[in-house]
Amino acid sequence: MLLQNHLGGLEMKSGGLWIDVKPVPGALVINIGDLLHIMSNDEIKSVKHRVVANQFEEPRVSIGVFLNPGKREEMYGPLPVLISFDKPAIS
């Protein structure tokens, strides 16, 4: 989760280029990582993203929190409605 302020610093990759994500002060950005990619059986792609160094004189606080369940394959998988003979479950 990211609570943005006016400083920004979040970038996403699109078409081989890194694009600045304009901050919306007070907005809460939630990156669910690969979870929707897995649940949608490859229909929704994960977005590559990064945070760039603070180029401003004002302080910025960033706290990264990562959740990676040890038994992810047992807990999460494609929704059954998105699995078919033509489109088997991704692994």
Image: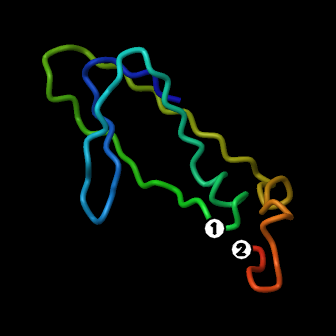
Which-is-in-front pick, marks 1 and 2? 1
Looking at marks 1 and 2 on the same chain, the residue that comes earlier in the sequence is marked by 1
- Mark 1 element type: loop
Q: Tell me the quadrant of the picture where the C terminus can be found.
A: bottom right
- Measured along the vertical axis of the image, is residue 50 above or below residue 24? below
Residue at the (65%, 53%) spot, across then down: 36
In the figure, is residue 41 to the left or right of 34?
right
Q: Position of residue 56 (x, y in %)?
A: 14, 22
Residue topped by disc 2: 90
- Measured along the vertical axis of the image, is residue 3 above or below residue 68? above
Three-letter amino acid code at the position of disc 1: Asp
In the figure, is residue 62 to the left or right of 72?
left
| Quadrant position of residue 38 | bottom right
Residue topped by disc 1: 42
Q: CA distance from mark 1 to mark 2?
A: 7 Å
Q: Position of residue 63 (x, y in %)?
A: 46, 26
Q: Are marks 1 and 2 in contact (CB under 8 Å)?
A: yes
- Mark 2 element type: loop
Q: Position of residue 26 (x, y in %)?
A: 42, 14
